[in-house]
Image (cartoon, rainbow, N blue to C red):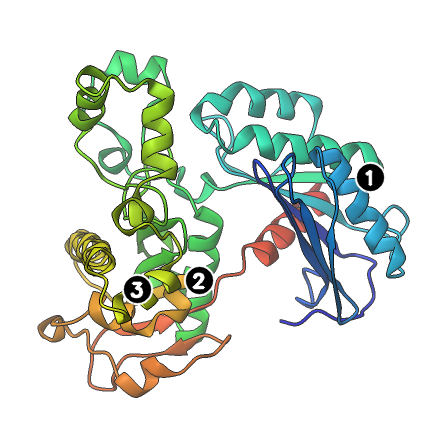
């Protein structure tokens, strides 16, 4: 998919607001053409900037962005300077990514004051994400009041997990009262990628059993049987599961108690430790997988250990999901690390030939933005690399909701 000039009418503006960032893309859900995209960084901090690409031209500005509203105002102005008036361009919708839908939301939903109030209410389940998503929603609503807005939830795809997979073994009354269960995240990506994998293989999703590995700075795995997820690695929050860039992933819950009792760390300090100072960063000082790889090449022992822990955890989930599924048809890698780290893919699946999982080294070494098979012809399990496209998925879901409204 490339950024270029095209007809704007009917396009969807997709917004993904983080705590200090605003990522956006103007995409046509029917043609998949991206007319513009960009990223506002360090909002509310020193050194804030905007990178905006439109009509084949990329512009980067160092500009003070005290809040998301100011950032979005500048984004709207950049669109206008490139010849697109978002207010009058005939946009089909503004599609917002929201991380946590709680037990309330599991379908793409038109934005109303009540919906925003509910998203605010469940923000305790995702305090680092939902409030920022909500800020972006309000900023866009003020500047584009006549364009229908739709919210797509990261947890939606996993809403129907089997009870055995979604239930934590704690007191049921406490769990019910405080909405404690496995929700799962990266759902938009897992749904999109699993469907694209089935399309690539020329088989209906209902006939396929897949393991999807979304490996980026945040990382998650899912087991998908016949198009429906039966398990996923992330839990009540995005902290559980695989080792990530700055998140610990799975950890003995007693570690939290120990850190509070013995190290005298507060809840906020432990939250920061596990979410922002752990994972690859905690083990070797670098959260970017490419930097970790470079350190390993330089002989850094801490980076090698971080990599080994990462791969060990990943293989544990692959093994568990193979057992859960019973029959495995495909393993699919996606997201920044999954799509680009050939060595990791090989190490994650090494020694599994007896299970029909065989990587072809030459195919694995190919770099491409297209879906591709990296398994050997003799294997019984297809191993694929399928680039994710959450923005397109959000655009399509948003357009569908508006069409039905």
Q: Which residue is mark 1?
A: 144
Q: Which residue is mark 3?
A: 295
Q: Residue at x 31, y 41 (%)?
A: 278
- Sequence-first tag of 3 and 2: 3
Mark pair 1, 2: CA separation: 32 Å
- Closer mark to the observer between disc 1 and disc 3: 3
Image quarter where the C terminus lies is: top right
Against 216, is 231 above or below?
Answer: above
Q: Residues within 10 Å of mark 2 (few under 14, many from 20)?
A: some
Against 24, is 33 above or below?
Answer: below
Residue 283 shown left or right of residue 386 in the figure: left
Q: Is residue 190 visible?
A: yes
Element type at mark 1: loop
Image coords of residue 153 (percent x, y): 52, 39
Q: Residues within 10 Å of mark 3 (few under 14, many from 20)?
A: some
Q: Which residue is mark 2?
A: 336
Q: Residue at x 19, y 73 (%)?
A: 357
- Closer mark to the observer between disc 3 and disc 2: 3
Q: Residue at x 28, y 38 (%)?
A: 162
Q: Residues within 10 Å of mark 1 (few under 14, many from 20)?
A: some
Name which quarter of the figure residue 8 lies in: bottom right
Element type at mark 3: helix
């Amino acid at each position: 998919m490339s950024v270029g000039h095209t007809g704007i009418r009917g396009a969807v503006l997709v917004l993904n607001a983080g705590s200090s960032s605003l990522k956006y893309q103007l995409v046509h859900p029917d043609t998949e053409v991206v007319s513009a995209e960009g990223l506002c960084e360090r909002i509310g901090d020193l050194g804030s900037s905007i990178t905006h690409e439109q009509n084949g031209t990329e512009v980067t500005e160092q500009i003070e962005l005290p809040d998301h509203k100011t950032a979005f105002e500048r984004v709207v102005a950049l669109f206008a300077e490139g010849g697109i008036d978002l207010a009058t361009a005939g946009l089909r919708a503004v599609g917002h990514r929201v991380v946590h839908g709680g037990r309330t939301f599991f379908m793409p939903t038109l934005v109303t004051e009540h919906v925003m109030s509910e998203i605010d209410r469940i923000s305790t389940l995702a305090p680092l994400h939902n409030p920022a998503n909500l800020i972006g929603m309000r900023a866009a609503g003020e500047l584009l009041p006549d364009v229908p807005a739709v919210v797509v939830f990261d947890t939606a795809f996993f809403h129907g997990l089997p009870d055995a997979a979604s239930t934590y073994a704690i007191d049921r009354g406490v769990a019910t009262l405080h909405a404690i269960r496995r929700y799962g995240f990266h759902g938009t990506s897992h749904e999109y990628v699993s469907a694209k994998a089935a399309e690539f293989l020329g088989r209906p999703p209902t006939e396929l059993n897949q393991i999807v590995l979304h490996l980026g700075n945040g990382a998650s795995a899912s087991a998908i049987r016949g198009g429906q997820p039966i398990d996923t690695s992330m839990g009540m929050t995005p902290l559980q599961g695989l080792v990530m860039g700055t998140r610990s992933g799975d950890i003995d819950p007693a570690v939290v108690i120990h850190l509070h009792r013995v190290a005298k760390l507060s809840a906020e300090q432990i939250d920061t430790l596990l979410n922002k100072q752990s994972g690859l960063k905690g083990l070797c000082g670098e959260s970017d997988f490419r930097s970790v790889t470079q350190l390993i090449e330089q002989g850094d022992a801490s980076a090698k250990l971080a990599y080994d822990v990462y791969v060990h955890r990943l293989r544990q989930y692959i093994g568990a999901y193979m057992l859960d599924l019973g029959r495995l048809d495909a393993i699919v890698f996606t997201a920044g690390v999954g799509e680009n780290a050939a060595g990791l893919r090989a190490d994650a699946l090494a020694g599994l030939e007896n299970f029909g999982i065989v990587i072809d080294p030459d195919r694995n070494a190919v770099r491409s933005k297209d879906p591709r098979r990296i398994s050997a012809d003799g294997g019984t399990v297809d191993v694929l690399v399928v680039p994710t496209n959450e923005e397109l998925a959000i655009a399509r879901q948003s357009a569908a909701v508006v069409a039905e409204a």
